[in-house]
Image (cartoon, rainbow, N blue to C red):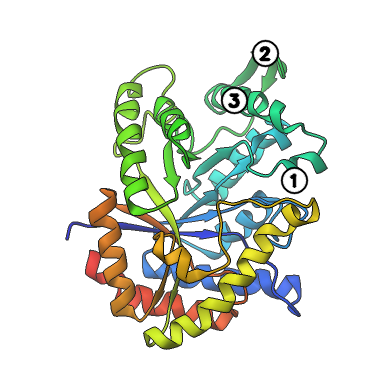
Amino acid sequence: MADKEFGIFDHLERRKDQAVADLYEGRLKFLEAADTAGIRTYHLAEHHATPLGMAPSPSVFLSAVAQRTQNIRFGPLLYLLPLYEPVRLIEEIGMLDHLSNGRFELGVGRGASPYELAYYNVPFLESKYMFEESIDVLRKGLRASRLNHKGEKYTFRDVPMEIPPLQQPNPPFWFGAFSNPNAQFAGNLGMNAVCGGTNKMVHDLKEIYDPARAAARGTERDLNPHVEKPMFGAFRHCFVGETDSEADAIAKPAYKKYYSNLMKLWRDFNSINTLFTPDIDEAKSYNVAISGSPETVRAEIERYFAESGTDYIVLAFCWGSLSQDQSNRSLELFTDQIMPHFK
């Protein structure tokens, strides 16, 4: 099988009875292991006012990642752009790109939770326009010595850009392409993309993305003109155990806890997001979760690549009630017994 690439996705969920400082240190050690094992990218989510995300400021945590790793590329998936003052964010991106010696990957998004945006006094319907204009501001500011922009939401006049990114013309942009319009949007702007859904859904989204990405190449709207091979992959929860029965016994309650963290704000406002399930067996039937022995997980990932037509997969190893030791062992089994099969 041709070489495939692997990434890690992380919500950095709170663990019961664990100090936040210990959570951070455990994750940094986990990433040191991923760094030496050949994982390509670490993608960190941004969430607010919820135990789902203990890295509400991705830049802060990623600055530590930059210092504790040498090879792995990393970035937010995603910065919630409506919550940021664009000039300040441009400066942080420049810093992170230099701190990591050019390993930064720039994920951007609008934000899926209206409740998280509301806590920042950002109207959900308005956030779409803030997000789209912010992308334009970032593109200009990362590529110029001075930022000039006049739009509906933001105006900047001749702002000096003193920390240009190490990667030119900018770090690679990423987007969450979880629907047909989003896959089209990502392709139209030349961004790399991560999606979700069944293997068939991933395949269909890639069929939308590929021609749009090809049409954007070399145009003014291409945010990644320096990326020769666009990256398109999907996100999956993953737990690898010594045996299928051991893995499933650990993963089942852990997935329920992840679901509880994911749904907390929705429940607080007496609503529910019907796209998710607390039952890992149901999630596995939709291909969005994988658990089992190394042989079982390897077969599922092999099936993912064959059915999706992609060569990139992003796996979450730390989620719900999984302990740090359990996540560490899962990663070890994955990198030792599964990854080599795909190289």
Badge 2 amino acid: Gly
Badge 3 amino acid: Glu
- Residue where numbered disc 3 is placed: 132
Q: Are marks 3 and 1 in contact (CB under 8 Å)?
A: no
Closest to the observer, 8 or 236: 236
Structural crowding at the residue carrying mark 1, measured as other residues with C-alpha within 10 Å and reported as few (<14), some (14–19) or many (≥20): some
Can the viewer see residue 71 in this picture? Answer: no
Residue 84 percent across, percent down from the top left: 71, 35
The picture quadrant where one finds residue 340 is bottom left
Q: Label 2: state its secondary structure.
A: loop
Label of residue 266 in the image: none
Work out which quarter of the rendered image holds the N terminus and state it: bottom left
Work out which quarter of the rendered image holds the C terminus and state it: bottom left
Which of discs 3 and 1 lies nearer the camera? The answer is 1
Rendered position, 246 above or below 140:
below
Which of discs 2 and 3 lies nearer the camera? The answer is 3
**Residue sitting at 58 percent across and 69 percent down?**
319
- Residue where numbered disc 1 is placed: 116
Label of residue 151 in the image: 2
Q: CA distance from mark 1 to mark 2?
A: 25 Å
**Residue sitting at 46 percent across and 73 percent down?**
33
Left or right side of 22 for 283: left
Badge 1 amino acid: Glu
Can the viewer see residue 38 in this picture? Answer: yes
Q: Between disc 1 and disc 2, whose residue precedes?
A: 1
Rendered position, 337 above or below 52:
below
Rendered position, 90 above or below 76:
above
Residue 279 percent across, percent down from the top left: 53, 69
